[in-house]
Amino acid sequence: MMRMARFFLFPLVLVLAGCSVSNNPLRKEVRLLQKGIIKDDTSYIYALPFEEGKSYRVIQGYFSHFTHKERAALDFNLKRGTNITAARDGIVVRAKEDGTSGGLKKKYRPQGNNIVIQHADGSRAGYWHIQHNGALVNVGDSVKKGQVIALSGKTGYAMVPHLHFLVWTSRNGQWQQVATRFQTSKGIKYLRSWKKYKRPG
Protein backbone atom coordinates (compact mmCIF):
# COMPACT_ATOMS: atom_id res chain seq x y z
CA MET A 1 0.00 0.00 0.00
CA MET A 2 2.83 2.40 0.82
CA ARG A 3 4.39 1.80 -2.60
CA MET A 4 1.11 2.67 -4.31
CA ALA A 5 0.79 5.85 -2.23
CA ARG A 6 4.23 7.00 -3.35
CA PHE A 7 3.39 6.24 -6.99
CA PHE A 8 0.40 8.57 -6.96
CA LEU A 9 2.05 11.33 -4.92
CA PHE A 10 3.63 13.18 -7.85
CA PRO A 11 0.41 13.53 -9.91
CA LEU A 12 -1.45 14.61 -6.76
CA VAL A 13 1.07 17.34 -6.04
CA LEU A 14 0.73 18.59 -9.61
CA VAL A 15 -3.02 18.88 -9.26
CA LEU A 16 -2.91 20.58 -5.87
CA ALA A 17 0.02 22.89 -6.53
CA GLY A 18 -2.21 25.82 -7.39
CA CYS A 19 -4.74 27.22 -9.80
CA SER A 20 -2.70 30.12 -11.14
CA VAL A 21 -1.22 29.90 -14.63
CA SER A 22 1.37 31.84 -16.56
CA ASN A 23 0.48 35.07 -18.34
CA ASN A 24 3.39 34.54 -20.74
CA PRO A 25 2.01 35.08 -24.27
CA LEU A 26 3.96 32.02 -25.41
CA ARG A 27 1.68 29.86 -23.24
CA LYS A 28 -1.37 30.61 -25.41
CA GLU A 29 0.64 30.04 -28.60
CA VAL A 30 1.86 26.67 -27.32
CA ARG A 31 -1.70 25.55 -26.52
CA LEU A 32 -2.82 26.44 -30.05
CA LEU A 33 0.15 24.60 -31.56
CA GLN A 34 -0.51 21.50 -29.43
CA LYS A 35 -4.14 21.42 -30.57
CA GLY A 36 -3.22 21.97 -34.22
CA ILE A 37 -5.23 25.21 -34.40
CA ILE A 38 -2.15 27.02 -35.67
CA LYS A 39 0.50 25.28 -37.75
CA ASP A 40 4.28 25.56 -37.74
CA ASP A 41 6.28 24.10 -40.60
CA THR A 42 9.42 26.20 -40.19
CA SER A 43 10.95 25.33 -36.81
CA TYR A 44 13.51 22.58 -36.28
CA ILE A 45 12.14 19.09 -35.60
CA TYR A 46 13.90 17.64 -32.54
CA ALA A 47 14.49 13.97 -31.73
CA LEU A 48 13.04 12.76 -28.45
CA PRO A 49 15.92 12.86 -25.91
CA PHE A 50 16.10 9.13 -25.29
CA GLU A 51 17.04 6.02 -27.25
CA GLU A 52 15.28 4.78 -30.40
CA GLY A 53 12.36 2.45 -29.81
CA LYS A 54 11.87 3.61 -26.20
CA SER A 55 8.67 5.21 -24.85
CA TYR A 56 8.43 7.62 -21.91
CA ARG A 57 5.72 9.80 -20.43
CA VAL A 58 5.80 13.59 -20.18
CA ILE A 59 5.01 14.14 -16.49
CA GLN A 60 5.08 17.92 -16.71
CA GLY A 61 4.63 20.01 -19.82
CA TYR A 62 4.95 23.57 -21.03
CA PHE A 63 3.73 26.20 -18.52
CA SER A 64 2.32 23.59 -16.12
CA HIS A 65 0.90 24.56 -12.71
CA PHE A 66 3.71 23.01 -10.68
CA THR A 67 7.35 24.03 -11.30
CA HIS A 68 6.86 24.97 -14.97
CA LYS A 69 4.47 27.86 -14.41
CA GLU A 70 6.86 30.21 -16.25
CA ARG A 71 8.81 27.62 -18.22
CA ALA A 72 8.47 26.34 -21.77
CA ALA A 73 10.01 23.07 -20.58
CA LEU A 74 9.23 19.36 -20.55
CA ASP A 75 9.83 16.72 -17.87
CA PHE A 76 10.26 13.14 -19.08
CA ASN A 77 9.71 10.30 -16.60
CA LEU A 78 13.13 8.66 -16.88
CA LYS A 79 14.40 6.38 -14.12
CA ARG A 80 17.86 6.85 -12.63
CA GLY A 81 20.58 5.73 -14.98
CA THR A 82 18.47 5.94 -18.16
CA ASN A 83 20.44 6.99 -21.22
CA ILE A 84 19.74 10.58 -22.29
CA THR A 85 20.43 11.36 -25.94
CA ALA A 86 21.05 14.62 -27.79
CA ALA A 87 17.88 15.95 -29.37
CA ARG A 88 19.93 17.80 -32.01
CA ASP A 89 23.50 18.14 -33.29
CA GLY A 90 25.64 20.71 -31.52
CA ILE A 91 28.56 21.67 -29.31
CA VAL A 92 28.60 21.09 -25.55
CA VAL A 93 28.91 24.48 -23.80
CA ARG A 94 28.19 23.33 -20.23
CA ALA A 95 28.58 20.01 -18.42
CA LYS A 96 27.97 19.90 -14.66
CA GLU A 97 28.00 16.55 -12.88
CA ASP A 98 29.32 17.25 -9.36
CA GLY A 99 25.92 17.62 -7.68
CA THR A 100 25.05 14.75 -5.34
CA SER A 101 21.57 15.46 -3.96
CA GLY A 102 18.09 16.60 -4.87
CA GLY A 103 14.63 17.30 -3.48
CA LEU A 104 11.73 19.74 -3.44
CA LYS A 105 13.52 22.49 -1.52
CA LYS A 106 15.16 25.49 -3.13
CA LYS A 107 18.42 24.71 -1.34
CA TYR A 108 18.87 21.82 -3.79
CA ARG A 109 18.82 24.00 -6.93
CA PRO A 110 22.63 24.45 -7.08
CA GLN A 111 22.99 20.64 -6.99
CA GLY A 112 21.22 20.22 -10.33
CA ASN A 113 23.59 18.55 -12.77
CA ASN A 114 23.08 19.50 -16.38
CA ILE A 115 24.37 19.57 -19.92
CA VAL A 116 23.78 22.46 -22.33
CA ILE A 117 24.31 22.03 -26.08
CA GLN A 118 24.52 24.91 -28.55
CA HIS A 119 23.11 24.32 -32.04
CA ALA A 120 24.20 25.66 -35.41
CA ASP A 121 21.52 28.39 -35.39
CA GLY A 122 22.69 29.69 -32.00
CA SER A 123 19.86 28.14 -29.98
CA ARG A 124 20.66 25.98 -26.95
CA ALA A 125 19.09 22.89 -25.37
CA GLY A 126 19.42 22.08 -21.67
CA TYR A 127 19.23 18.63 -20.10
CA TRP A 128 18.77 18.81 -16.30
CA HIS A 129 18.84 16.57 -13.20
CA ILE A 130 21.43 14.13 -14.54
CA GLN A 131 22.92 11.83 -11.94
CA HIS A 132 26.18 12.43 -10.07
CA ASN A 133 29.08 11.82 -12.47
CA GLY A 134 26.45 11.18 -15.13
CA ALA A 135 27.78 13.44 -17.90
CA LEU A 136 29.16 11.36 -20.77
CA VAL A 137 30.42 14.37 -22.78
CA ASN A 138 32.68 17.33 -22.01
CA VAL A 139 32.58 21.04 -22.80
CA GLY A 140 33.78 21.56 -26.36
CA ASP A 141 32.66 18.13 -27.61
CA SER A 142 30.70 17.93 -30.85
CA VAL A 143 27.64 15.72 -30.49
CA LYS A 144 25.26 14.20 -33.01
CA LYS A 145 21.50 13.89 -32.73
CA GLY A 146 20.74 10.61 -30.96
CA GLN A 147 24.15 10.33 -29.28
CA VAL A 148 24.07 9.26 -25.62
CA ILE A 149 25.23 12.29 -23.62
CA ALA A 150 24.23 11.61 -20.00
CA LEU A 151 22.49 9.41 -17.44
CA SER A 152 19.21 10.50 -15.89
CA GLY A 153 19.02 11.23 -12.19
CA LYS A 154 17.39 13.32 -9.47
CA THR A 155 19.89 16.08 -8.66
CA GLY A 156 18.79 19.63 -7.93
CA TYR A 157 15.20 20.82 -7.51
CA ALA A 158 13.46 17.54 -8.28
CA MET A 159 10.87 15.38 -6.56
CA VAL A 160 11.46 12.24 -8.63
CA PRO A 161 14.13 11.12 -11.11
CA HIS A 162 13.39 12.66 -14.49
CA LEU A 163 14.83 14.61 -17.40
CA HIS A 164 14.02 18.33 -17.55
CA PHE A 165 14.45 19.48 -21.17
CA LEU A 166 14.19 22.98 -22.56
CA VAL A 167 15.39 25.07 -25.49
CA TRP A 168 16.34 28.75 -25.60
CA THR A 169 16.96 31.07 -28.50
CA SER A 170 18.54 34.54 -28.51
CA ARG A 171 16.30 37.30 -29.82
CA ASN A 172 17.44 40.93 -29.79
CA GLY A 173 20.18 40.00 -27.35
CA GLN A 174 17.77 38.32 -24.91
CA TRP A 175 17.57 34.59 -24.24
CA GLN A 176 14.01 33.32 -24.55
CA GLN A 177 12.60 29.84 -23.96
CA VAL A 178 10.82 28.29 -26.93
CA ALA A 179 8.52 25.32 -27.40
CA THR A 180 9.84 22.64 -29.76
CA ARG A 181 8.45 20.13 -32.22
CA PHE A 182 9.50 16.49 -31.91
CA GLN A 183 9.51 13.53 -34.26
CA THR A 184 7.49 10.77 -32.59
CA SER A 185 6.33 7.34 -33.75
CA LYS A 186 2.98 8.99 -34.52
CA GLY A 187 4.32 11.95 -36.43
CA ILE A 188 5.63 15.44 -35.65
CA LYS A 189 4.11 16.81 -32.47
CA TYR A 190 4.27 19.45 -29.78
CA LEU A 191 4.28 17.24 -26.68
CA ARG A 192 1.58 17.39 -24.01
CA SER A 193 1.49 16.58 -20.29
CA TRP A 194 0.71 12.98 -19.26
CA LYS A 195 1.04 11.65 -22.81
CA LYS A 196 3.51 8.86 -23.55
CA TYR A 197 5.73 9.23 -26.61
CA LYS A 198 7.86 6.73 -28.50
CA ARG A 199 11.01 7.61 -30.38
CA PRO A 200 10.89 5.94 -33.77
CA GLY A 201 13.80 3.88 -34.95
Image (tube, rainbow, N blue to C red):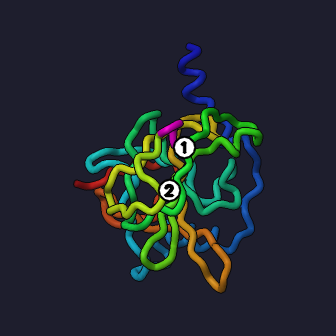
Residue at mark 2 to residue at mark 1: CA–CA distance: 29 Å
Q: Which residue is found at the position 43% from the left and 41% from the top?
A: 151
Q: Which residue is mark 1?
A: 97
- Residue 170 locus on image (x, y percent): 60, 78
Determine which quarter of the picture holds residue 14.
Answer: top right
Q: Hey, which residue is sitting farthest bottom in the picture?
A: 172
Q: Which residue is found at the position 62% from the left and 30% from the top?
A: 9
Q: Amino acid at mark 1?
A: Glu
- Regarding residue 35, the answer to whether it shows in the image is no
Q: Amino acid at mark 2?
A: Arg
- Residue 119 locus on image (x, y percent): 44, 71
Looking at the rendered structure, the number of numbered marks drawn on it comes to 2
Is residue 52 in the magenta section? no
Instruction: Give the label, 2 or 1, closer to the camera.
Output: 1
User: Relative to 171, is 84 above or below?
Assistant: above
Q: Are marks 2 and 1 in contact (CB under 8 Å)?
A: no
Nearer to us in this view, 113 or 11:
113
Q: Earlier in the sequence, mark 2 or mark 1?
A: 1
- Residue 55 locus on image (x, y percent): 35, 45
Q: Hey, which residue is sitting farthest top in the picture?
A: 1
Q: Which residue is mark 2?
A: 192
The crowd level at tag 1 (other Cα within 10 Å; few <14, some 14-19, many 20+) is many
User: Relative to 15, is 40 above or below?
Assistant: below
Query: Where is the N terminus found, in terms of image quarters?
Result: top right
Kindly state the secondary structure of the residue where label 1 is placed: loop
Task: Check residue 71 in the rendering and tell me which mark sits there, or answer none.
Answer: none
Magenta part, dominant SS: strand
Q: Which residue is found at the position 37% from the left and 67% from the top?
A: 89
- Residue 139 locus on image (x, y percent): 48, 58
Q: Which residues are magenta?
A: 128-133
